[in-house]
Image: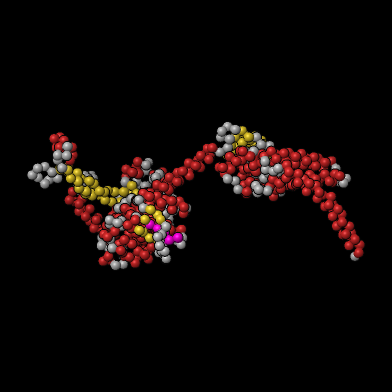
Amino acid sequence: MAKKPFKPNSFEEKQKEIRDLTESLNERVDSYFNTPEQMKEYLEYKSKFYQYSSRNMALIDSQFYGANAVGNFGFWQKHGFSVNKGEKGIKILKPNPFIYFKRADSDKKIPVSKATAEEKQRIQNKDLRVYKDMYFEITYVFDISQTNATAKDLPDIFPNRWLEGKVENYSLVYQSLEKVAEKNGIKIVEPYEELGAAKGVCYTMLKQVALNPRNSELQNVKTLIHELAHATIHTEETNDQYTHNEREFQAELTAFTVSSYLGLDTSEYSLQYISHYSKDDTQINDKIRLLDEVVQTAHGFIEVIEKDLVENRNLEKESLEKVENNEPKVNIEWSEVEGLKPDMVMNFKEMNELLLTANKELRTGNKDVFEIDTKYKVIDPDGSVYSPSKFTMSKLEDNQPFSSIAQQLYIQEPELYKKLNENYNFSNEELGFEKEDNPMKALEAKFTDYQKLLQDEKSGHFNEETIVQRLTLENDYYDIKSEFIKAGVVTEKNVQILEEKVTAAFPKQKQENEKSQSKHVVQELDR
């Protein structure tokens, strides 16, 4: 059976469809005023489609509840996606300007495109007047769920949109709202009088707003949007065109909408507020006009906020990329650590965390290995190469001065450590020690172990193995002491005092031990 040829709707049919659509959406908009809950639903929806008029948002809402991101067929195609087969488009109204002129002795509207060459010249010379009308036509859009795109594709489809859903950083939000004020020529000032329980105030004639210093952060954000809405819509020139209820209704609608966009739930307060100011229908004269002004104001606010948030996100991303591109690399020369191979290259943070973890596992695990060494070098972005001494991980914590390579560089390569810390800001946990006092503690532990073995030798309690251990500890101690002094983390005077304190403690400690043992023997005998 042959398909019937497509017959486009006549102009009259199109106009009837638009009239029917307009009538249904007016009823829809009117329904939003029935209860605070319906208004909340509408406002939350509006925060996602802030760039659309009240009418078109109502149309989208009525035809495709829960839509997230819409575009026409060409929009999705342009971004490399297609509308799924069988999907029905969402009708919206597209405004179209109609520019025309009239010929002498005729009221017929003639499109400028149909003008003769002579008439076009006269129009250009402003000898022939042109007029402009606005008419609407129906166009179709599709939600992302009607296409083969997914939510993960949204950042690429809308690169200049904030799509994270919420903004948790108060200072970032407040900074964006300051830019909204600046864009609209509004000053945020300290209140000129005691505000009592009021959360904020708008000084209409001064185009200034103020917040109550007792407010919480959430109250500050919501109230600032409310007062900025007053200062934007209800100016010195327009203030008298609205009733008190209309002004408060619009300000709170704007505050709730923008707060919803920011992921802040103010419904408990806002809906009660909106209900109070909207319950008297006689004071809400033109609902569509009021809502359109709210849409326009919220749209303007969100555009400024979104631009600022996206710029901050991009700056943060660039900063992160800069750190990643400019960070020093660690090149493994050789290592006894499982998984590390010669010529392996890692970024410094990864390497530090890996060895810090391996170090802890060696000390707390059941491995038979006593020591594990790693030799590495650090290559700075400017081409400088640093070759610290090998990084030794020991089963006995007291036998090693370094818990992490960040800690090792803190002692051996202070200039490189300073560069690294500007990027990473190492915590004490990542260093594996408290920066303020660890060098002296490390020296004290190493010197005490060395002196203990030395005292054993002097007292005759030694063998070949203990002599080797003592010599190793002695060499380690003097090497580390030299490095610490060279790096400037300890002074020679500090080290001298430390050595005198530890050395003086040994004979006394030994005598006390002998007395304790003698006392113990006597007690045993007395029994």
User: Magenta residues?
Assistant: 209-213
Quick one: quadrant of the N terminus? top left
Q: Which is nearer the eye, 146 or 510?
A: 510
Q: Quadrant of residue 520?
A: bottom right
Residue 372 in the image, given as x and y percentages of width and height: 70, 41
Quarter holding residue 492:
top right
Is 211 magenta? The answer is yes
Residue at the limit of the structure toward the front, as seen here: 192
Q: Is residue 377 above or below residue 201?
A: above
Query: On the rendered structure, is 109 left or right of 223?
Result: left
523 relative to 126, above or below: below
Q: Is residue 455 magenta?
A: no
Q: Residue furthest right?
A: 525
- Residue 204 vertical position relative to residue 390 in the rendered view, above or below: below
Residue at 38% x, 52% y is 181
Q: Nearer the viewer, residue 145 or 448?
A: 448
Residue 295 relative to residue 424: left or right? left
Quarter the C terminus occupies = bottom right
**x and y percentages locating residue 359 in the rendered image:** 67, 45
- The residue drawn where x is 50% and y is 40% is 321
Q: Looking at this rendering, what residue extends furthest in the top direction?
A: 383
Which of 269 and 185 lies nearest the eye of the viewer?
A: 185
Q: Main secondary structure of the magenta part?
A: strand
Q: Is residue 372 visible?
A: no
> Where residue 420 sits in the image (x, y, percent)?
58, 41
Q: Residue at x 53, y 40 (%)?
A: 323
Residue toward you, 164 or 76: 164
